[in-house]
Image (spheres, grey):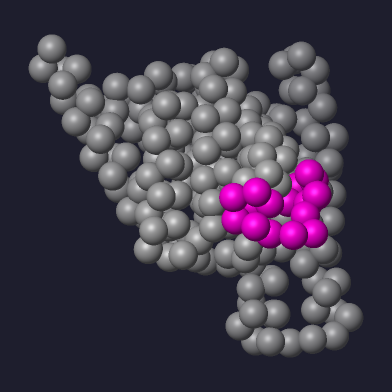
Amino acid sequence: MKTTHKSNLMKLVMLAMLVAIGVVISPILRVEGMCPMAHFINIVCAVLLGPWYSLLCAVLIGIIRMTFMAIPPLALTGAVFGAFLSGMFYRLSKGKLIAAFLGEVFGTGIIGAIVSYPVMTYLVGRTGLTWFFYVPSFISGTLIGGSLAFVFLRALAKNGQLARFQTALGSASYAVSSDVWSNAVGIAALGLIGYLASVVLLKMLLKLSGTWVTVVPYALVGAALLAAVIYLIRNRSQLRQQA
């Protein structure tokens, strides 16, 4: 009983920390319909605490943002579905980080985006929207924030820290091996992070313009995808063994 009580207390402390961090970092790179850092928190919470805690974390962050930051209901519709599905996909896949990533993309990028249409149209009174109006921006946000979370959690998993955190929190812990597909996805994800960093640096901070400023972010994505393909080719023998 004492161990269970301690685990529950640690989960609540971790939940409170993630909610606080999520509220603080959510304005970073945020535009209406895209909040990359919210998806980062969703996936991290889903992997560390599970689907129900991740859902609660998304709800609390959304309510705080709506109350104190005047954010529209997109703060909830653009977070809760992905948060829950990220945790469920991770659990059903027995600890595959890529499954947590895909759960966030599908839950937020598709379900959350579609649900946002009637919410914003009939509750907020926005006009000119369609059922798929928010899909591109929601998917873009999940790809950016999800990539950051994937690389972060993958690094923790490789040195064994992720399993230690999960065990200490009383969450389901899975032995994560270094498989070729996950490493390739991690390499490709670096391209999305590079895209994000270059856009922020060149367009938002330095306020540069020109064709090359537009090309550089996409070049970084292309380079990362190429590197991932080369990695798969060079490790094709190990890939066949895993199959």
Does residue 208 show up?
yes
In screen coordinates, is 168 left or right of 83? left
Q: Position of residue 62 (x, y in %)?
A: 45, 49
Q: Position of residue 194 (x, y in %)?
A: 68, 62
Please tell me which residue is depicted at 27% across the width and 27% down the height of the picture.
Answer: 168
Quarter-of-image position of residue 137:
bottom right
- Residue 232 or 117: which is nearer the viewer? 117
The residue stretch that appears in magenta: 120-135
Q: Indicate the quadrant containing the N terminus: top left, top right, bottom left or bottom right.
A: top left
- Residue most toward the left? 2
Please tell me which residue is depicted at 52% across the width and 19% down the height of the picture.
Answer: 91
Q: Position of residue 93 (x, y in %)?
A: 59, 17
Q: Is residue 103 above or below residue 225?
A: above
Is residue 126 covered in magenta? yes
Is residue 128 covered in magenta? yes
In screen coordinates, is 91 left or right of 13? right
- Residue 54 or 195: which is nearer the viewer? 54
